[in-house]
Image (cartoon, rainbow, N blue to C red):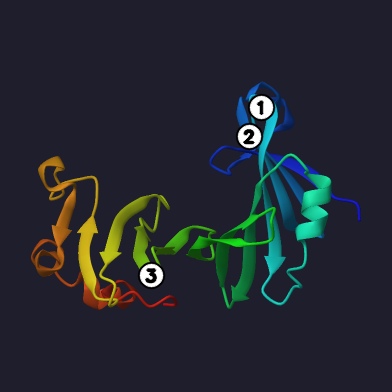
Amino acid sequence: MTADITFENEFEKAITSDEAAINLHFHKVFTVNAEVFRKEEYKNNLLVSVIHYLKADDDELILSELVNHYPDLDWFEIRIIEQIGVYRKEIQRFLLSTGAYEDFQITLLRNEDGLPIFEKEDEIVDERSHSGTRKYYYDPLSKQEKFEFIYKPDGHLSSMRGSEPPFVAENDYSIQYCEIEFFFPGFLSENPYYQNADLLP
């Protein structure tokens, strides 16, 4: 299998090979048939982690290959990808070289522009399950993040965050659910995706 190699910065944004050569923190990206299948993360020219991509229906028995290829690493990030219409679902899990998964995972949903619109963290601590869900709204023109929505464990909307008034530092740049209609009349009815913590719009 011959892979094409490109580079990304620490935030996984594309950079040139020349930029990577002078960057202290970057990703080396391996692509086959226009699909990313692995990333190597480097800091100060040392390999610090590996991200391996699987499709939702792929065989996950990849551990032995990763351990043989990267014997100095204790864990690997596994990203399971599923295309759902125009959306891309991505589950991030952390696989230890012993073969066990960490009790933590992140579920992302990206829109047609590749921007994350849904993020859920699931973790088991002391045999108790904890989760947190956020959604992101982007300015339609600039594609810059404008609002962040935070949900209760039961899926109900809890609060909304932003960086411009009426969001202020004294309130951790957030307003509560009961204030959203006052400050942004009609927003939730025009954008029902943000009314609850459901994955898909």
| Residue assigned mark 2 | 26
Viewer-nearest residue: 93 or 56: 93
Q: Left or right: 9 with respect to 1? A: left
Residue count near mark 1 (Cα–Cα under 10 Å), binned few <14, some 14–19, many ≥20: some
The crowd level at tag 3 (other Cα within 10 Å; few <14, some 14-19, many 20+) is few
Q: Residue at x 47, y 59 (%)?
A: 116
Residue of label 3: 129
- Quick one: SS at disc 2? strand
The amino acid at mark 2 is: Phe
The C terminus, quarter of image: bottom left
Q: In this picture, is 91 found above or below 200?
A: above
Disc tally is 3
Q: Answer yes or no: is residue 36 visible.
A: yes
Which of discs 2 and 3 lies nearer the camera? The answer is 3
Which quarter of the rendered picture does the N terminus lie within? Answer: bottom right
List the residue tagged with mark 1.
19
Please tell me whether mark 1 or mark 3 is closer to you in this view.
Answer: 3
